[in-house]
Image (cartoon, rainbow, N blue to C red):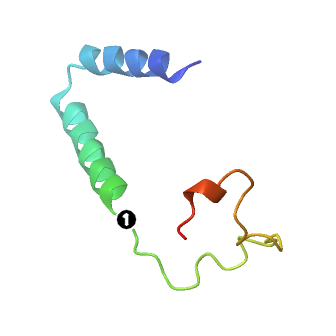
Amino acid sequence: MNTEFLKLELIEWILSLKDAEALNEIQKMKENFSENALAVQPRQFGCGKGIFTYVAEDFDETPPGFEDYMLP
């Protein structure tokens, strides 16, 4: 199932609800999701350690064909 189909199915299910308490519960879930989705944890020093395990010896060299773009 693709996400668009699931979204439409969920919307239809919510529209069919008649119970105000259930709708209020869904509203609370939505608010909690929005708050958690926007909360971004600050990065900590060293959090990327070990991600790069190999760096080529010519990493700082100018790639072929880019000599014309280099400053004199």
Q: Of residues 67 and 30, which is closer to you in this image?
A: 67
- Image x and y of residue 29, in percent: 30, 45
Q: Is residue 44 left or right of residue 23?
A: right
In the rendered view of the protein, which quadrant contains the N terminus? Answer: top right
Q: Residue at the far bottom: name it.
A: 45
Image quarter (top left, top right, bottom left or bottom right) of the C terminus: bottom right
Q: How many neighbours does mark 1 have within 10 angstroms: few (below 14), some (14-19), or many (20 or more)?
A: few
Q: Quadrant of residue 14?
A: top left
Coordinates of residue 37 in the picture (x, y in percent) = 36, 53
Position above or below: 52 against 38: below
Q: Is residue 35 above or below residue 51?
A: above
Q: Nearer the viewer, residue 41 or 17?
A: 41
Q: Quadrant of residue 11?
A: top left
The residue under label 1 is: 40
Q: Residue at x 27, y 56 (%)?
A: 35
Q: Is residue 69 left or right of residue 57?
A: left
Left/right placement of residue 6 relative to residue 26 reads: right
The one of 56 and 41 positioned closer to us in this rendering = 56
Q: Residue at x 73, y 69 (%)?
A: 61
Q: Residue at x 34, y 57 (%)?
A: 36
Identity of the residue drawn at 33% across and 62% down: 39
Q: Nearer the viewer, residue 64 or 72?
A: 72
Q: Image quarter for residue 12?
A: top left
**Label 1 sits on what residue type?**
Val
